[in-house]
Image: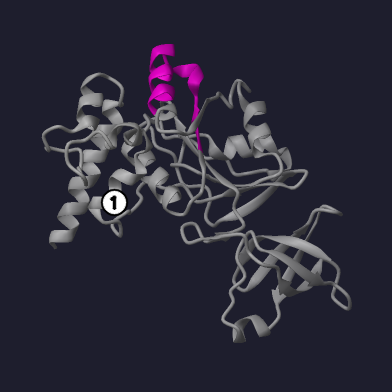
Amino acid sequence: MKGKIIKGIAGFYYVHVPEINEVFECKAKGIFRLQNVKPLVGDDTELDISGQPKGKGVITRILPRKNELIRPAVANVDQAMVIFAAAEPAPNLNLLDRFLITMGRQNIHTIICFNKKDIVDRKDMEMLTETYIRSGHKVLGISVLKQDGTAAVKELLKGRTTVLAGPSGVGKSSLINTLNPDARMEVGTVSEKIKRGRHTTRHSELIYVDDNSYVMDTPGFSSLYIDDIEEEGLKNYYNEFNEFKDKCRFIGCMHLNEPGCAVKEALSEGKISSIRYDNYRALYEELKDIKKY
């Protein structure tokens, strides 16, 4: 019997078998420990339920992995979807850029989803969308509360395993409940006082949506560290620079203070978002300072 690990807690692995839409609580065979192989959420497996109590099984084989992410620790990911609120809480776009860089380093295509579009001005929504479409990402504006755009989200998830991530309080759990009401996610409330969400997801877990579609819910994040990147390589994760970088006067231009920088010229002409560029500058200085110490 074949299935996918959807959750791992304290040495137990919960394996979903799509053919019968059932989940089995499994232990892994000792051979994996000897081979130094740790089963991951997202692993496709073979399991044996013969001679086991009802609902229990043993993982006998881990099928070859398509890929393996470090943060979050998950296997066989097709794409990521990062969810930020367009307002309440206001989107931290520096944090969003950090997430895009983290996924970009692992060669995972990321879709950006701005929730709560029903409570922002159309101009603000257009600004967010335009900023990140230029970066080469697909951008969706949705309202989970009004059920606006959620069908488009479901279509993008079809037949894929998607890492779903974002800060707390942005509507991530509510979206999962909409995609699969049986998920019965604990929905976090946003504190009226500080407009920030309480963490509701405590571990990474795959949730079956339908027809071989899974979403991986990850704990809400308030910070992401990218301190293992060399500052000289940061510009490679800003896709909108690519169109202009070869026109810079100097090879290896950092697009900061160098004369004849085509990226800075494009910025002044409004062809590159000042929001993204300012984030790039801030992250570059942060990485440079880390290197000093």
- Left or right: residue 232 compared with residue 219: left
| Above or below for 47 versus 260 | below
Question: Residue 117 magenta-drawn?
Answer: yes
Q: Nearer the viewer, residue 71 or 176?
A: 71
Instruction: Tell me which residue sits at (23%, 52%) in the image.
Output: 231
What secondary structure is found at the residue carrying circle 1?
Answer: helix
* Quadrant in the picture for residue 186: top right
| Above or below for 216 versus 67 | above
Question: Residue 268 magenta-drawn?
Answer: no
- Left or right: residue 106 compared with residue 156: left
Q: Nearer the viewer, residue 286 or 120?
A: 286
Instruction: Tell me which residue sits at (62%, 65%) in the image.
Output: 8
Q: How many marks?
A: 1
Q: How did the renderer colour the structure?
A: one colour
Instruction: Tell me which residue sits at (53%, 51%) in the image.
Output: 218
Give the labeled residue for mark 1.
233
Q: Residue 89, percent across and down?
A: 39, 31
| Above or below for 274 versus 236 | above
Q: Which residues are magenta?
A: 111-131
**Which quadrant: the N terminus?**
bottom right
Crowding near the residue tagged with mark 1, few <14, some 14–19, many ≥20 C-alpha atoms within 10 Å: few
Q: Residue 200, percent across and down?
A: 52, 47
The answer to whether residue 20 of the structure is visible from this angle is yes
Hey, what amino acid is under mark 1? Gly
* Quadrant in the picture for residue 130: top left
